[in-house]
């Protein structure tokens, strides 16, 4: 015979499995994020991953040959910064639905969101749940 506690535990386990599957899908989507930016005059094209890591540098034309080393370095870093902003925006779009409304996806991804402020010092626990955790399953009365 199942009790309301057993049914609630089953429900919570199902919710957990759903959240775990959603987290797996989100992680997959984040791993696949890639953004590319091209510097003016097609001097350089830079691709970065979700964390802003440089994954490719391409020189689509010979225009880079006419640049001084400092100009080429500037073109590469500017394109990389632009691609990194694009990747951050894509990652933000992917996780926004999984965050509380009061948390900015950009702040979350940059590590500046105050997540601790969202959680109480002590989790709210109903007296019935606390008694169940501390004392085990309640006795099942005949006829119930």
Image (tube, grey):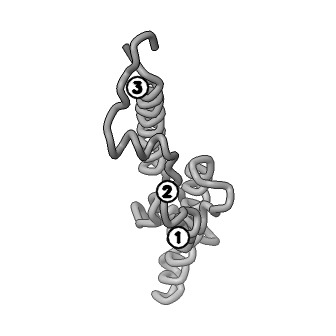
* Rendered location of residue 106, percent (x, y): 60, 65
The residue at 59%/57% (across/down) is: 92
Q: Give residue 8's position: percent from left, percent from top.
A: 47, 29
Indicate the quadrant where residue 42 lies: bottom right
Q: Is residue 54 above or below residue 93?
A: below
User: At which x and y percent is residue 40?
Assistant: 64, 71
- Can residue 140 be seen in the rendering of this structure? yes
Residue behind mark 3: 6
> Is residue 61 at least partly visible in the picture?
no
N-terminal-most mark, 1 or 2? 1
What distance separates the C-alpha of mark 2 from that of mark 3?
Answer: 21 Å
In front: 18, or 111?
18
Residue visible at 44% across and 29% down in the picture:
5
Q: Which residue, as the protein is rendered here, is positioned at the far top?
A: 143
Label 2 Cα crowd, 10 Å radius (few <14 / some 14-19 / many 20+): few
**Badge 1 is on which residue?**
110
- Say which residue label 2 marks: 123
Tell me the crowding category of disc 3: few under 14, some 14 to 19, or many 20 or more residues within 10 angstroms, Cα based.
few
Q: Quadrant of residue 141?
A: top left
């Amino acid at each position: 015979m199942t009790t309301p506690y057993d049914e609630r535990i089953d429900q919570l386990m199902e919710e957990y499995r759903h959240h775990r599957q959603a987290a797996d899908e989100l992680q997959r989507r984040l791993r696949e994020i890639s953004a590319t930016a091209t510097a003016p005059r097609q001097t350089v094209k830079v691709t970065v991953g979700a964390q802003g890591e440089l994954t490719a540098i391409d020189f689509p034309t010979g225009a880079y040959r006419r640049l001084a080393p400092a100009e080429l370095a500037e073109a590469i870093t500017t394109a990389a910064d632009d691609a990194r902003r694009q990747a951050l925006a894509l990652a933000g779009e992917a996780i926004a639905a999984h965050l509380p409304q009061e948390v900015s996806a950009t702040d979350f991804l940059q590590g500046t969101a105050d997540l601790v402020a969202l959680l109480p010092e002590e989790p709210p626990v109903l007296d019935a749940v606390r008694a169940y955790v501390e004392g085990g399953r309640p006795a099942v009365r005949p006829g119930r």
